Amino acid sequence: MNLRRIVVPIVVLVVLAGCGGSKTFSAGDLASILPGKADTPQGLKFLPDSSGNQAIDLIVKDGDQQNKFIGFGFQGAYASFYANDGALAILQQQATPADPAAHVVTMLGVVFKTADGAHKALALDLQKDMATGTNVKQIAVKRIGDETIAESGTQAALPLPAYLIYWREGNAIFAVIDAGGPTAPATLEAAQAFAATMDSRARKA
């Protein structure tokens, strides 16, 4: 598998609030909000070919869902991707058996034309997530932005158990996924720390 194609789709979310919120982002703001190479978590590698600006077909694989995202006013997306060798082998379908220490962290920002468009995208992604994931459960975290959800479980697009935090701030959706094998240091606390960093940067954008 081409590393440029190793991007975890945003499979998300929930409706916890209305579509209000005064913050408005442009696609150009995302590069200053998403972490980069300097923020690489310990033990992982930053993957530049899988990070940066993302076409819609890299974050949403289903053609019907892509069309709906476009209808919701999709403007642009940006990802930061980190993994160790064990995780890369799994994602490239080279690992048999899987490395129990495999560890992936990915962060994503997606901008829509309006807050309502972003809100609708959350609801659509939640349907997809619950329909295709394995043992996916909602878990409690501190609210971020206008809408927030956290999940644990295994998504169809990423064959590792994960903690996921997603939130909407105005017309943008942000996401953190911390996934790993049974001996990997993937934790909800780590995902929350990454989310807090992104939220702080988003507030300053």
Image: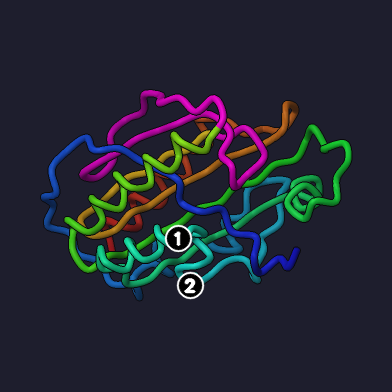
Residue indicated by mark 2: 55
Q: Residue at x 13, y 52 (%)?
A: 21
SS assignment at label 2: loop
Can you give x and y, in whole percent of width and height, for residue 163 in the image?
A: 52, 34
Which is nearer the N-term, disc 2 or disc 1?
1
Q: Which residues are magenta?
A: 134-162
Q: Could you say where residue 17 lies in the image, as x and y percent from the top left? A: 17, 38
Residue at the (55%, 63%) spot, across then down: 36
Farthest residue to the front: give it.
Answer: 64
On the rendered structure, is 100 left or right of 128? right
Check if residue 141 falls in the magenta segment.
Answer: yes
By secondary structure, the bulk of the magenta-drawn segment is best described as strand
Q: Quadrant of residue 146?
A: top left
Q: Which mark is residue 192?
A: none
| Residue 27 magenta | no
Residue drawn at (32%, 72%), measured in percent from left and top?
75
Q: Is residue 18 left or right of residue 179?
A: left
Location of residue 39 in the rendering, given as x and y in whole percent from the top left corner: 57, 56
- Using the image as rendered, state which of residue 104 and residue 97 is in the foreground: 97
Q: What residue type is disc 1 on? A: Leu
Q: Residue at x 52, y 59 (%)?
A: 61
**Which residue was labeled with disc 1?**
34
Q: Quadrant of the N terminus?
A: bottom right
Hey, which quadrant is residue 128 in on the image? top left
Q: 10 Å neighbourhood of mark 1: few (<14), some, or many (≥20)?
A: many
Please determine whether, in this image, residue 143 is positioned above or below residue 35: above
Q: Amino acid at mark 2?
A: Ala
How far, Cα to Cα, is label 2 from label 1? 16 Å
